[in-house]
Amino acid sequence: MLTPIAYGLAIALNLMVVWIGIRFLAQPMAAAAGYGVPAKENGDRAYLTIKGVRDGTYGILGLALLALAGAHAEAWFMLVVALAPVGDTMIVLRNGGTKAVAYGIHAATAAVMLINAALLFAV
């Protein structure tokens, strides 16, 4: 029973990260607003593109690890990559974003990733 939950949650998390990456590439301004720190209209969109590429790559790498290396490798990946939403939490808080977005989206994502890592280590 634990294996399908651990794998299912890992797949869902990785697909969500791929989706976020695609959104930052396709709709960077809307994605930045959803992130919690709206981008300036005349700002440098290159940084939004970087975020899109980073997130898309993380999601694809996570799916590849799960499929090709298994639960243990994916667990380590989730453990390490949970640092990204922790950093995102700090970025939102330090740049005028709301606590609701910082904690409700980014910190919660980090917590779910850590729970998923624990589940994958247990499989």
Image (cartoon, helix red, strand yellow):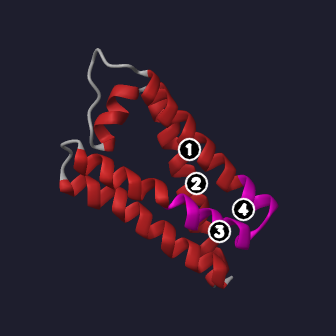
Q: Is residue 5 magenta?
A: no
Q: Within 10 angstroms of label 2, few (less than 14), some, or many (20 or more) residues? A: many
- Point out the stretch of residues depicted in magenta: 64-82
Please give the residue where the numbered disc 4 appears in the rendered image.
Answer: 66
C-alpha gap between disc 2 and disc 4: 10 Å
Front disc: 4 or 3: 3
The kind of residue on which mark 1 rests is Val
Q: Quadrant of residue 37?
A: top left
The answer to which of marks 3 and 1 sits earlier in the sequence is 1
C-alpha gap between disc 4 and disc 3: 11 Å
Magenta: main secondary structure? helix
Q: Within 10 angstroms of label 3, few (less than 14), some, or many (20 or more) residues? A: some
Q: Is residue 69 magenta?
A: yes
C-alpha gap between disc 2 and disc 3: 14 Å
* Labels 2 & 3 near each other (Cβ < 8 A): no
The answer to which of marks 2 and 4 sits earlier in the sequence is 2
- Disc number at residue 14? 2
Image height of 114 relative to 95, above or below: below
Asked which secondary structure carries label 2, the reply is helix
The answer to which of marks 4 and 1 sits earlier in the sequence is 1
Residue 28 x/y as whole percent: 40, 27
The residue most toward the front is: 94
Left or right, 38 with respect to 11, comes to left
Please give the residue where the numbered disc 3 appears in the rendered image.
Answer: 76
- Disc number at residue 18? 1
* Labels 2 & 4 near each other (Cβ < 8 A): yes
The residue most toward the top is: 42
The answer to which of marks 2 and 3 sits earlier in the sequence is 2
* Labels 4 & 1 near each other (Cβ < 8 A): no
